[in-house]
Amino acid sequence: MSEPHLLLFGPPGAGKGTQSANVADAYGIEHVTTGDALRANKDMETEHGTPREYMEAGELVPDPVVDAIVAEALATAEGYVLDGYPRNLDQAAELDAMTDLDAAAYLSVSESTLVERLTGRRVCTECGRNHHVEFDPPEEAGVCDDCGGELTQREDDTEDVVRERLRVYRENTEPVVERYRERGELIEIDGEQPPEAVWTDLDAAIENVL
Ligand code: AMP
């Protein structure tokens, strides 16, 4: 069988980044993440402006910009796990035209947990590791346990922007999740559990459909 084509859905803060990295490692496939790609190209000039202005406000970056990133990444990937795309119905139609999926999984997490996770998240500027001020605090405040790098808060992890990201998710992305669910193509995973337990469930569910 060819390398798997997987999709991971979930609201901001559900653990998509962490779990997609696990999937990519375990299955030897690429982790294609629009959020990371956009963060690495925040000041790229496009005819719609730069990604930064949308991201800092918690809004979606315009479809043509994001569609192009995904099309380029998928063109060279044998197998992949897609994280953060599609985020609206037009992107979902674009993805349908680009590729076939083997599985779509959804990490479900309550809104209060999401707000707690996101506003307390601190990211290492050197190695990218996430800490959490309460759930996974570093030994020394502001310093990454893994590499000693500086921990910062993502500009879009402040409470106001988090609320807007969740609103945008409900309005734009939930209908996409619903579409996969109605087609019977969605694997639902309890994303409230600790990361290790989420991974156990996710891995078993993917194994089951491949
Ligand atoms: P994430 O790291 O997935 O939470 O994405 C961070 C931000 O990048 C989002 O709030 C959006 O501004 C932008 N972004 C990421 N993926 C997409 C997408 N598929 N469509 C539009 N904007 C996106």
Image (cartoon, rainbow, N blue to C red):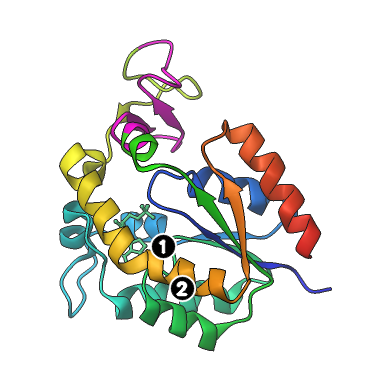
The residue beneath circle 2 is 70
Q: Residue at x 48, y 79 (%)?
A: 71
- In the image, is residue 59 part of the stretch drawn in magenta? no
Is 194 left, or right, of 143 in this rendering?
Answer: right
Give the camera-side residue of 170 and 88.
Answer: 170
Q: What x and y, as percent, mark residue 11?
A: 40, 52
What residue span does the magenta drawing correspond to? 116-140
Q: Residue at x 48, y 77 (%)?
A: 72
Q: Which amino acid lies under the numbered mark 2 shown in the image of this protein?
A: Val
Is 50 left, or right, of 30 in this rendering?
Answer: left
Q: Is residue 141 above or below residue 165?
A: above
Q: What x and y, as percent, mark residue 24?
A: 65, 53
| Residue 41 visible to an observer of this rendering | no
Q: Residues within 10 Å of mark 2 (few under 14, many from 20)?
A: many
Q: Residue at x 45, y 84 (%)?
A: 93
Q: Is residue 23 above or below residue 168?
A: above
Residue lying at the far front in this picture: please name it: 182
Give the camera-side residue of 124 and 180.
Answer: 180
* Quarter occupied by residue 35: bottom left
**Ligand 1 position by quadrant:** bottom left
Mark 1 or 2, nearer chain start: 1
Q: Is mark 2 within 8 Å of ligand 1?
A: yes
Quarter that holds the N terminus: bottom right
Q: Is mark 1 within 8 Å of ligand 1?
A: yes
| Marker disc for residue 34 | 1
Q: Is residue 42 above or below residue 192?
A: below
Q: Which amino acid lies under the numbered mark 1 shown in the image of this protein?
A: Thr
Quarter that holds the C terminus: bottom right
Q: Residue at x 41, y 72 (%)?
A: 69
Circle 1 — which element?
helix
